[in-house]
């Protein structure tokens, strides 16, 4: 199927460039000798002949462009390769213009004046085709590279994101097994449900907001098992039925980030709010930072910011030392 699409695209480009070349040759002819152009006129037979003539000329031009591109460019783009490709393509198109015009002159004996006129016209066309073919070729490579980069970057970011949460949960479970086997069993069941969600959406670019919220609530229940009555998370009801999209684990990561960087005890619990405002899902927590000599890397936040930027969205962070707030852009339905 991919080969069919590729050849269909080549045939389409060949047809468009052939017609454009024919029209361009008429325009050049009119600019060079308008009186002769008007006086001679173009019959239907002449038009058909010129289209066929231009089709054969552009067919070779496309073929040589692709061949040289495969030799000098392939998947590597550099200025020396680019310059070599352009120069050879221009030379090949110019040589082909001379050769093709000589073949035409030998078959139809159009005369010396016509020969030089057509040679000049197709010399200019050769230059134009070189630029067009090179631009098409390099644009296709750059577009493909950009798409591959986005996909690879997204995959890498997701792979960095998932183990972080899993390892933290496993460490908590290990502590609970020693301290409270009954709670450890409850934690294991809840953790298996959460892990199923993570695995299911590992390769998804987006997930429905209501599914992510259900996941966040399960995560909060795990935190309640491991640290009872120290964290209060308030989630707006409208988010539980929201069918718009968000990034997988985005809300959970921000809740986890708040828990990780702030003190939370039974005497002074941590309050976190998750609600919707305009085009954002907002995760807001009271600031009560853990006193630590180690600097924070904010890797999770940077990871999330980059993932949103790959979708053309911007994550907004604000901190007035009383409240820390992260605005996660709501993604439209897909």
Image: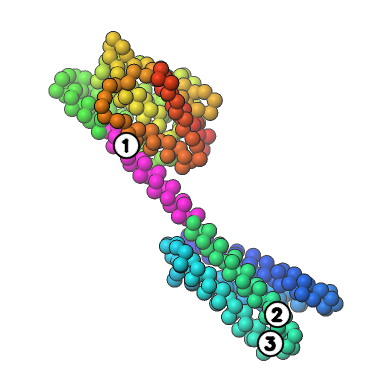
Mark 2 and mark 3 in contact? Answer it, CB < 8 Å: no
**Residue found at the far front of this picture:** 293
Q: Position of residue 232 (x, y in %)?
A: 35, 16
Tell me how far mark 1 sits from mark 3, CA to CA: 70 Å
**Disc 2 target residue:** 118
Earlier-in-chain disc, 2 versus 3: 3
Q: Position of residue 154 (x, y in %)?
A: 40, 44
Residues 284 and 239: in front is 284
Magenta span of residues: 143-166
Describe residue 158's horizontal placement relative to residue 82 as left or right. left
Magenta stretch: includes residue 223:
no
Residue 179, above or below 310: above
Q: Secondary structure at mark 1?
A: helix
Crowd band around label 3 with a 10 angstrom C-alpha radius: few (<14), some (14–19), many (20+): some
**Disc 1 target residue:** 162
Q: Secondary structure at mark 3?
A: helix
Give the mark toward the camera: 2 or 1: 2
Residue at position x 45%, y 63% from top?
78
Q: Position of residue 13 (x, y in %)?
A: 60, 64
**Disc 3 target residue:** 105
Describe residue 2's horizontal placement relative to residue 19 as left or right. left
Residue at position x 53%, y 34% from top?
332
Color theme of the render: rainbow
Tell me how far mark 2 sits from mark 1, CA to CA: 65 Å
Crowd band around label 2 with a 10 angstrom C-alpha radius: few (<14), some (14–19), many (20+): some
Majority SS type along the magenta span: helix
Q: Secondary structure at mark 2?
A: helix
Residue 122, above or below 312: below
Tell me how far mark 2 sits from mark 3, CA to CA: 10 Å
Earlier-in-chain disc, 1 versus 3: 3
Question: Based on the displayed image, in which of its 4 quarters is residue 119 positioned?
Answer: bottom right
């Amino acid at each position: 199927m991919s080969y069919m699409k590729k050849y269909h695209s080549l045939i389409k480009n060949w047809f468009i460039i052939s017609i454009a070349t024919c029209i361009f040759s008429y325009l050049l002819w009119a600019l060079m000798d308008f009186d002769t152009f008007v006086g001679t006129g173009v019959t239907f037979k002449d038009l058909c002949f010129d289209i066929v003539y231009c089709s054969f000329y552009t067919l070779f031009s496309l073929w040589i462009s692709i061949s040289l591109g495969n030799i000098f460019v392939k998947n590597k783009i550099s200025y020396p390769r680019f310059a070599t490709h352009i120069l050879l393509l221009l030379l090949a198109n110019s040589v082909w213009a001379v050769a093709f015009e000589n073949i035409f002159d030998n078959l139809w004996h159009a005369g010396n004046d016509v020969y030089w006129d057509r040679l000049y016209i197709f010399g200019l066309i050769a230059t134009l085709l070189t630029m067009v073919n090179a631009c098409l070729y390099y644009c296709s490579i750059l577009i493909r590279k950009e798409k591959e980069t986005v996909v690879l970057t997204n995959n890498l970011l997701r792979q960095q994101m998932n183990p972080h949460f899993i390892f933290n949960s496993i460490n908590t479970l290990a502590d609970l097994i020693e301290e409270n086997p009954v709670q450890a069993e409850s934690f294991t069941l809840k953790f298996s449900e959460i892990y199923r969600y993570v695995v299911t959406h590992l390769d998804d670019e987006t997930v429905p907001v209501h599914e992510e919220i259900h996941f966040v609530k399960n995560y909060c229940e795990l935190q309640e098992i491991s640290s009872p009555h120290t964290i209060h998370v308030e989630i707006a009801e409208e988010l539980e039925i929201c069918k718009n999209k968000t990034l997988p684990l985005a809300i959970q990561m921000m809740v986890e980030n708040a828990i990780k960087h702030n003190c939370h005890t039974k005497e002074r619990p941590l309050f976190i709010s998750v609600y919707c405002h305009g085009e954002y899902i907002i995760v807001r927590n009271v600031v009560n930072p853990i006193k630590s000599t180690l600097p924070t890397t904010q890797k999770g936040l940077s990871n999330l910011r980059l993932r949103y930027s790959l979708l053309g969205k911007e994550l907004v962070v604000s901190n007035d030392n009383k409240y820390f707030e992260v605005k996660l852009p709501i993604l439209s339905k897909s």
